[in-house]
Amino acid sequence: MVEIFSAGEGEYTEKKSKFLGVVASVKSEEEAVAFLEAKKKQYHDARHNCSAWRICGASGEVTSRFSDDGEPSGTAGKPMLEVLEGAGVVNAICVVTRYFGGVLLGTGGLVRAYTESAKRALAAAQTMERRQGQRLSIATDYHGYGKIEYLLRAAEVPIVDTRYESEVILSCVVAPDQKGRLEAQIVEATSGLARLEYGEETGFAVLNGEVVFL
């Protein structure tokens, strides 16, 4: 699943109507409603503040909502929601504010405008792919360090931290389907001398090469 790390904004103009789009991170429907109300207050003089959001629950179910906010049914909120769905984005809200330019756009024009506004806002946002894993600490002597680092990078296991003390301690995050095979490889590579200690399960993402815990 893809989530929003930092919000994005996009602007689109069609026949003098101005559309201001924003995509931001929200973790619950309550946060989504509060974000929408804040935008309505910020753009209180606008004709419409249309919205769409997708929230992922604790068990993985996704709840979706959208509003046309006075635009013809199906011309605003639903196209915006389809942009989020198409990108696989969850825990996110999109709000597009319209300042009417005096010229009616028609159904097709509205769908195009709200879709493009949502796309531009999403393109401007910084996204990250949520993954599930378990923290793992590996202690090894300096001879085994290079072998373990090679195995981790080959398996695309993100290394969170490396400490160089009397021995080397690597902290990483391992996906559930990687644990057994990786552990066996490390045991074989170090003749069983490396010590592995598993920690808590956590959601995480890799952003610009750095691990972000969610």
Image (cartoon, helix red, strand yellow):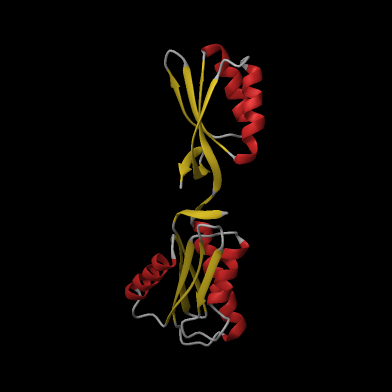
- Quadrant including the N terminus: bottom right
Q: Is residue 155 visible?
A: no
Say which residue appears at 38% left-offset and 67% top-offset. 35
Residue 100 pos. (x, y %): 44, 83
Residue 195 pos. (x, y %): 53, 21
* Lateral position of residue 33 relative to residue 154, left or right: left
Q: Is residue 134 visible?
A: yes
| Image quadrant assignment for residue 150 | top right
Say which residue appears at 58% left-offset and 73% top-offset. 79
| Image quadrant assignment for residue 108 | bottom right
Q: Is residue 131 above or below residue 144?
A: below
* Lateral position of residue 168 relative to residue 46, left or right: right
Say which residue appears at 55% left-offset and 54% top-offset. 2
Number of dots carrying numbers: 0
The foreground one among 108 and 76 is 76
Q: Is residue 176 above or below residue 198?
A: below
Residue 169 pos. (x, y %): 47, 22
Residue 112 pos. (x, y %): 59, 75
The foreground one among 35 and 18 is 35
